[in-house]
């Protein structure tokens, strides 16, 4: 019994000694670009453009978002765990006339996500899955103010995320490509945006807001 106990401690010591050699802590930073599927949101934009009698530059649909992704990764052999933050955004504006008076309006849409991921690697490839919490914000400009914006909507919800991993390792920095899909668990709401557009009747302002994207990331340290 004592022999088995000593043997168990030996195994534990060997494991603890080997983990630092097998594990690695990395910081990531890079670009995040995405195509968004937001039918309810973009249907509101289409209705708004159709209702304008005079339009010089119509309000464009939100079909893509771009921004920054940062995070940390802890890797042990062929498995890894990540905590990440991303913020992607875009804007659209309109220039037209109502009752002979010209007007312009601009809108900003942003999508921020906090997420935890688990990853598996084989050679230069891999895959991952995770759980995220995302927040969409819609803002518009304030007449007479260049810097301040009026917040129309803030809507949050949980989402899943699935992605592939393509790695180009290096001695000090690695380049990693991650095509991904966000799977929404709840809809995002854009009621304030609908009211701002003055649509009558008010259309459905709830949207699944599906996201298909690509992260282009740099990881520090030898991979």
Image (spheres, rainbow, N blue to C red):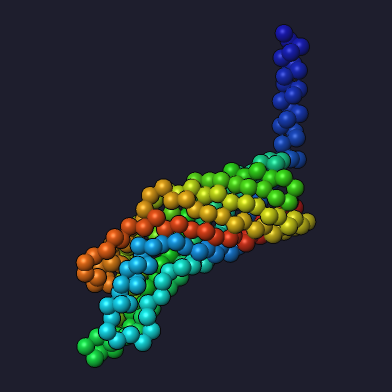
Spot occupied by residue 192 in the image (x, y as percentages of width and height): 28, 65
> Is 185 situated above or below 9?
below
Residue 145 seen anywhere in this rendered image of the structure = no
- Residue in the foreground of this view, choosing between 110 and 209: 209
Farthest residue, direction right: 171
The residue positioned 48% from the left and 58% from the top of the image is: 211
Q: Quadrant of the N terminus?
A: top right
Spot occupied by residue 129 in the image (x, y as percentages of width and height): 56, 46
Farthest residue, direction top: 1
- Residue in the foreground of this view, choosing between 131 and 57: 57
Farthest residue, direction bottom: 100
Spot occupied by residue 96 in the image (x, y as percentages of width and height): 32, 85
The residue positioned 70% from the left and 41% from the top of the image is: 78
> Is 171 situated above or below 65?
above
Residue 201 seen anywhere in this rendered image of the structure = yes
Q: Quarter of the image holding residue 176?
A: bottom right
């Amino acid at each position: 019994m004592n022999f088995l106990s000593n043997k168990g401690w030996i195994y534990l010591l060997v494991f603890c000694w080997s983990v630092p050699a097998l594990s690695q802590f990395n910081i990531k930073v890079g670009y995040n670009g995405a195509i968004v599927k937001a039918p309810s949101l973009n249907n509101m934009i289409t209705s708004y453009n159709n209702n304008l009698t005079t339009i010089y530059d119509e309000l464009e649909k939100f079909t893509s978002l771009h921004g920054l992704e940062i995070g940390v990764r802890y890797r042990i052999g062929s498995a890894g765990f990540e905590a990440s933050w991303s913020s992607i955004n875009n804007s659209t504006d309109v220039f037209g006339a109502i009752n002979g008076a010209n007007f312009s309006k601009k809108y900003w849409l942003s999508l921020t996500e906090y997420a935890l991921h688990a990853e598996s690697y084989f050679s230069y490839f891999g895959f991952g899955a995770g759980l995220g919490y995302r927040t969409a914000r819609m803002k518009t400009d304030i007449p007479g103010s260049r810097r301040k914006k009026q917040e129309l909507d803030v809507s949050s919800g949980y989402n899943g995320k699935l992605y592939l991993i393509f790695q180009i390792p290096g001695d000090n920095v690695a380049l990693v490509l991650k095509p991904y899909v966000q799977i929404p668990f709840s809809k995002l709401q854009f009621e304030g945006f609908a009211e701002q557009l003055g649509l009558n009747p008010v259309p459905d302002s709830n949207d699944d807001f599906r996201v298909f994207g690509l992260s282009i990331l740099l990881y520090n340290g030898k991979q």
